[in-house]
Each structure stands twice: as structure tokens, then as C-alpha cells.
Amino acid sequence: MTENKAMKPIWFFVGLMLIVVGGLVFLTGIYLYFNPESAHTVLSNTYPNLWWGGIMIVFGIFMLLIKDEG
């Protein structure tokens, strides 16, 4: 009785990591949006944490949806 369990491709785990880290960055951006005096940098008015967190989450979801071509 041999079961053929398909292994997950590496991109699945890359997508999971991007979603988790992007979520943490995005949550930090939300915190800094409502508490702007907590961390002041030169370009803090552009809210880079919100942008990069969102980009990482979207790209992580894209990586999860990629089918294994092999």
C-alpha cells in the first residue's frame, strides 16, 4: 500500500511567508497611520508600511495561486 502524496512546491511556502510578513508590515502601517507621532521619518507621510505590506500580501496570494507546472 503506497500512497502518492504530492509535495508542495517551494512557491507555496514562499507565498505563505510573504502573506505573514506582509500582514505584519501592514498592521504596523495601520498602527503608524493612527499614531503618527510614534515614529517620525523623512517620508513617513507616504505610509510605506501600508504600501509594502499590501504589495507583499498581494504577491503572496499570487504565489499561492500558481499551479505547479511539473
Image (cartoon, rainbow, N blue to C red):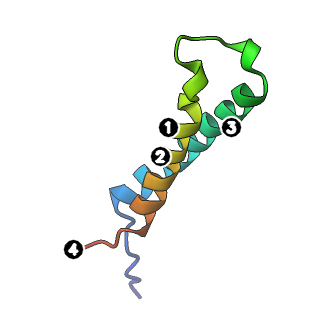
Residue 36 image-quadrant placement? top right
> In the rendered view, would you say 15 is above or below 68?
above
Query: Closer to the N terminus: mark 2 or mark 4?
Result: 2
Q: Which residue is mark 3?
A: 27
Q: Which residue is mark 4?
A: 70
Image location (x, y in percent) of residue 13: 44, 53
Q: Amino acid at mark 2?
A: Ile
Residue at 42% over, 61% down: 62
Image location (x, y in percent) of residue 37: 75, 13
Q: Secondary structure at mark 1?
A: helix
Residue 69 falls left or right of residue 21: left
> In the rendered view, would you say 50 is above or below 54?
above
Q: Which residue is mark 2?
A: 55
Q: Amino acid at mark 4?
A: Gly
Q: Amino acid at mark 1?
A: Trp
Image location (x, y in percent) of residue 40: 64, 11
Image location (x, y in percent) of residue 31: 74, 30
Q: Are marks 2 and 4 in contact (CB under 8 Å)?
A: no
Q: Which residue is mark 1?
A: 52
Q: Nearer the viewer, residue 6 or 37?
A: 37
Q: Are marks 2 and 1 in contact (CB under 8 Å)?
A: yes
Q: Nearer the viewer, residue 38 or 12?
A: 38
